[in-house]
Image (tube, helix red, strand yellow):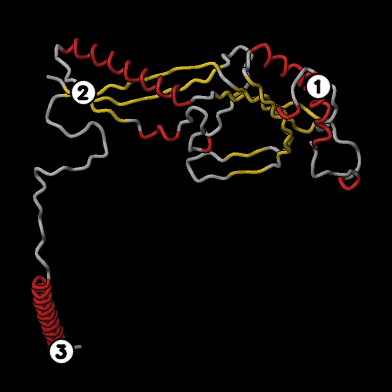
């Protein structure tokens, strides 16, 4: 290719590039103008924002302490009271006593049962209880089927192992009578070959829960008042007469007197039997107190 032809080609390429850039710029400007027109039309359709003045109005507040301009401090009053139990329920849990060594043969050679711990197998234990003076209507025999309770995160899942239960109700319980019943069940179970005593739990109740819970609240108030007076004395201030009081949000999940909480892993009031523990019902209450000072 000659030098003249080469120069002509370069000039043609430069002109084409210049025309393309000019066209692109023009299109960009057109798009920009179109967008501005759309925004202008949209602004005409937008309703003016309504702003309300809430000064001087009551505003709800979910968190503690309450709204106020006065100096204040907060204390937690903790109350705990107990009362001798009017009734106790002993819960004996039994499980099958499987052999440690499997016999020779295949699984099809051995019969399986849907009820490894049946009521008939628990009858000798019931007879032992009647022998020491427990009435038949104070004894309840239950067969528990195995089950699994799967809960969403973060709550733990629970599994119930199948077996048998014997519930013994004791009116006006005391340590000696409770121990006598537990010893009788333990000795009767030791004589059986196919059943093991897995655990023993106990649940205590009282006839008048309202009086016990009232005493727990009064104990929490007294504890908070003592703490507030001590803090006020240390700060050199004077407490105003009436504080603001609130129960903690977690109170509904904690078991109360003769009641169960609302969470699966804290819902059972029964605890492991301890022969040295008090035969009593204990109630605890937490309260939040905000004291204003002057």
Contact between labelled residues 1 and 2, with CB atoms less than 8 Å apart? no
Circle number at residue 5: 3
Who's the residue at 15% across and 15% down the image?
A: 238
Q: Identify the residue at horizontal 48%, vertical 26% (top origin).
A: 209
- Secondary element type, mark 3: helix
Does 74 sit above or below residue 162? Answer: above
Q: Quarter of the image for the C terminus: give it.
A: top left
How far apart are the two marked residues, 2 and 1, measured between alpha carbons? 60 Å
Gap between marks 1 and 3 measured at Cα: 121 Å
Secondary structure at numbered mark 1: helix
Residue 40 position (above or below residue 179): below
Quickly name the residue at label 2: 242
Secondary structure of the residue carrying tag 2 is loop
Does any portion of residue 10 appear in the rendered image? no
Q: Residues within 10 Å of mark 3 (few under 14, many from 20)?
A: few
Q: Which residue is mark 1?
A: 128
Q: Earlier in the sequence, mark 1 or mark 3?
A: 3
Q: Residues within 10 Å of mark 2 (few under 14, many from 20)?
A: few
The answer to whether residue 6 is left or right of residue 118 is left
Residue in the foreground of this view, choosing between 83 and 194:
83
* Labels 1 & 3 near each other (Cβ < 8 A): no
- x and y percentages locating residue 91 in the rendered image: 67, 27
Q: In the picture, residue 218 is in which quadrant?
A: top left
Q: Which mark is residue 57?
A: none
Tell me, yes or no, if residue 52 can be seen here. Answer: yes
Q: CA distance from mark 2 to mark 3?
A: 103 Å
Determine which quarter of the picture holds residue 129. Answer: top right
| Residue 180 image offset from top left, x and y in percent | 72, 14
Q: Is residue 221 left or right of residue 205?
A: left
- Tell which of 271 and 216 is nearer to you: 216
């Amino acid at each position: 290719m000659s030098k003249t032809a080469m120069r002509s080609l370069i000039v043609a390429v430069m002109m084409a590039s210049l025309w393309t850039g000019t066209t692109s710029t023009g299109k960009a400007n057109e798009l920009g103008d179109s967008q501005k027109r759309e925004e202008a039309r949209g602004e005409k359709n937008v309703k003016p924002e309504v702003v309300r003045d809430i000064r001087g109005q009551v505003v709800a507040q979910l968190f503690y302490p309450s709204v106020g301009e006065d100096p204040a401090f907060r204390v937690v009053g903790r109350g705990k009271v107990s009362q001798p139990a009017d009734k106790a329920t002993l819960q004996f849990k039994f499980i099958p006593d499987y052999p440690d060594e499997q016999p020779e043969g295949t699984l099809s050679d051995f019969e399986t049962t849907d009820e490894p711990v049946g009521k008939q197998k628990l009858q000798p234990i019931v007879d032992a209880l009647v022998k020491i003076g427990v009435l038949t209507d104070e004894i309840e025999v239950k067969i528990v089927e195995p089950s699994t309770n799967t809960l969403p995160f973060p709550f733990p899942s629970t599994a119930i192992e199948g077996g048998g239960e014997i519930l013994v109700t004791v009116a006006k319980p005391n340590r000696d009578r409770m121990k006598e019943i537990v010893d009788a069940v333990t000795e009767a179970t030791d004589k059986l070959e196919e059943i093991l005593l897995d655990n023993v739990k106990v649940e205590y109740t009282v006839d008048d829960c309202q009086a016990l819970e009232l005493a727990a609240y009064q104990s929490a108030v007294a504890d908070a008042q003592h703490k507030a007076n001590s803090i006020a004395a240390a700060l050199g201030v004077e407490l105003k007469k009436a504080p603001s009081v609130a129960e903690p949000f977690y109170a509904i999940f904690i078991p109360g007197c003769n009641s169960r909480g609302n969470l699966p892993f804290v819902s059972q009031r029964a605890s492991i039997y301890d022969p040295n523990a008090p035969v009593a019902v204990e109630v605890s209450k937490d309260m939040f107190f905000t004291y204003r000072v002057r």
